[in-house]
Amino acid sequence: LDTAMSSADRAAALTHRLLAFARRQPLDPSVTDANALIVGMSDLLRRTISEAIDLRIETAPGLWPTLCDPHQLENAILNLAINARDAMPDGGTLTIETGNGRLADTDAAPRPGAPPDEYVRIVVRDTGTGMPPEVIARAFDPFFTTKPLGQGTGLGLSMIYGFAKQSEGHARIESAVGTGTSITLYLPRHHGDADIRTGSVAGAEMRRGAGETILVVEDEQVVRDLIVEVLQDLGYRVLEAVDGLAGLRVLQTPGRIDLLVTDVGLPGLNGRQLADQARETRRALKVLFITGYAETAASASGFLDPGMAMITKPFPMEALVARIRAMIEGGTA
């Protein structure tokens, strides 16, 4: 079981990276405090890098919030830290720095047709071997790697670049052989009020329900059975359906349904079509979409209407339960 889970996790990570550099990964953007996220990662980062490397985290006071997927931002910072570690086999200094700025203050090109915007800047800097100009020119290319065969996929920096671009930001490399490398992420400043998220919910205690009714629509029996069993154990009343048409029949019958949990990629009537038809009669129905990847769900911000949320496979059950609880406590349908 451990071997099977390890293989599945590696395959899932590879898929996410492929979708990231293709800029088609499903993102769940939210208002994120990058300072809190990075400080929260400090123990993980120190365990990941060599003891010979001095980790310095320099967070700017008054850092603006940014709108991005905090889990993908964690992944990007961790990947950059691992790259820096590999570039400093004899030790050195790894600095992670945050700050506020404007894209116009850099030599990076702003988005076409858009005026210069305010950005949150995250810099990961090492004192390692550095890169020659020909490597810098290709560093963000998918599958490009300078590591020996079997020691790297060449997807790390391309995944980070894809994440930054898909978040309406930018990424830039500055490096010189023998002096180290500095990689900067520019993420757009968020204006407005919203709950700030700082990272992963994995490992959190799963909160119990109070008899609320949840309809689970999932065509993969193993996934459906697991979700149903966990929710029932936590005190929810769970209805289930194997596809969109079966789910729609349940939704068209009388009775209270507090939340619809549905896969996006269903045969016949897909998850989004199911939700739209269900809302013709249940106008306030809350919907949580589950997806590994869907062409129309490349970005949750462009796919979701009010009262809808998305979670991507693979996910810890704690994350699913936390999202369900948060949606239900925001009101029922």
Image (tube, helix red, strand yellow):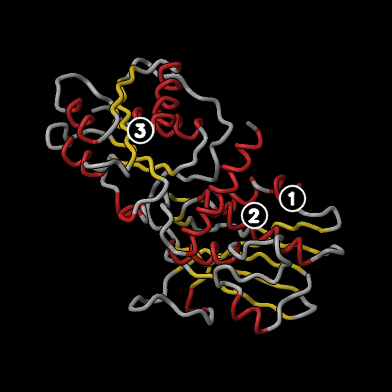
Q: Residues within 10 Å of mark 3 (few under 14, many from 20)?
A: some
Image depth: mark 3 or mark 2 in front? 2
Image quadrant in which the N terminus is located: top right
Give the residue displayed 34% in from the left and 39% down from the top: 263
Q: Secondary structure at mark 3?
A: helix
In the image, residue 298 lies at what x, y percent?
37, 56
Q: Residues within 10 Å of mark 1 (few under 14, many from 20)?
A: few
* Disc number for residue 78: 2
Query: Toward the viewer: 54 or 77?
Result: 77
Where is 298 relative to 312, above or below? below
For marks 3 and 2, the one nearer the N-term is 2
Image quadrant in which the C terminus is located: top left
Residue at numbered disc 3? 327
Report the Cα–Cα distance between label 1 and label 2: 8 Å
Q: Amino acid at mark 3?
A: Met
Q: Secondary structure at mark 2?
A: helix
In the image, residue 60 lies at what x, y percent?
61, 60
Q: For this view, does 257 lie left or right of residue 229?
A: left
* Disc number for residue 48: 1
Give the residue displayed 71% in from the left and 77% down from the top: 131
Residue 189 occupies quadrant: bottom left
Where is 251 relative to 15, above or below? above
Residue 24 occupies quadrant: bottom left
Image depth: mark 1 or mark 3 in front? 1
Q: Are marks 1 and 2 in contact (CB under 8 Å)?
A: yes
Q: For this view, does 331 lie left or right of residue 273?
A: right
